[in-house]
Amino acid sequence: MAKPKPVDTRPLGDERSWARTHGTYIAGRAYIDGADETACEMESKWGVDRLRLLVRPELREKFDRQRYLLNQAIWHGDLEGVRREAGRMVNAWQALDRAAVAAGKQPLAPTVWEVPLADGSVAAIVPDATHGRAVNAEGRQVAVYTLEEIGRLLTAFPQLAQPKLTFPGATISEIRPRSVEDPLNDIWDSKNDLDDPIDDIGRN
């Protein structure tokens, strides 16, 4: 007697999942990557996790809902759902960008580079103290570092630079945290509908 086929209980294990075949995975990634590219462009323009804080709460709520719907499509949707929600996510980013510009908000200065830190804060790197005045915290926890200060840190703690000297071209990577508490962090999996009670999220 043949053994019954085991049920794939993984989030992407559904028969209709966009990631079930190589072809549908490639198609879905094309749209997800487009949404991610737009997110990177907006972050480069406005700073780390800053743009959603520059718009009115009503628009920020719509934006966060769309992020949730995209996550839901990625975890549990079919290819058409991924295509639809990724496209809407691009539109959502562009809507925030237009709203921030219309409100007279200033993009990230070209002399300011921002990077998220493990504790959720943001490090803003500037050429010198004069350019530090161009940093806009906008409700975020931001620490400003000049190039001279970074040089002093590397001098005082040479072990920080040692891996780079030992392995030229090596990069250091880790999971990117957010400087402002992200409302979607409290929703571990986009399985439920937006109108489901909070207590039910993650139980099924």
Image: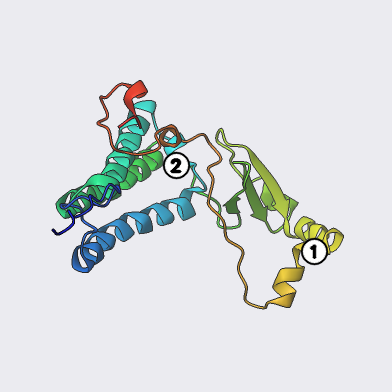
Q: Is residue 188 above or below residue 17?
A: above
Q: Residue at x 44, y 38 (%)?
A: 104
Residue type at mark 1 is: Gln
Residue type at mark 2 is: Leu
Q: Which mark is residue 159?
A: 1
Report the quarter where the N terminus lies: bottom left
User: Distance between the Cα atoms at labels 1 and 2?
Assistant: 35 Å
Instruction: Answer with left or right where residue 73 lies relative to residue 104.
Output: left
Q: Is residue 87 above or below residue 165?
A: above
Where residue 44 sits in the image (x, y, percent)?
48, 55
Residue that numbered label 2 is attached to? 51
Q: Residues within 10 Å of mark 2 (few under 14, many from 20)?
A: many
Q: Is residue 195 above or below residue 153?
A: above
Q: How is the image coloured?
A: rainbow
Q: The residue tagged with tag 1: helix, strand or loop?
A: helix
Where residue 119 sits in the image (x, y, percent)?
63, 42
Along the line of sight, the residue nearer the viewer: 120 or 115: 120
Q: Residue at x 42, y 51 (%)?
A: 42
The answer to which of marks 1 and 2 sits earlier in the sequence is 2
Where residue 40 sits in the image (x, y, percent)?
43, 56
Along the line of sight, the residue nearer the viewer: 77 or 41: 77
Q: The residue tagged with tag 2: helix, strand or loop?
A: helix
Determine which quarter of the picture holds residue 121: top right
Determine which quarter of the picture holds residue 28: bottom left
Where residue 106 sits in the image (x, y, percent)?
49, 44
- Whether residue 127 is visible here, answered yes or no, is yes
Q: Which mark is residue 57?
A: none
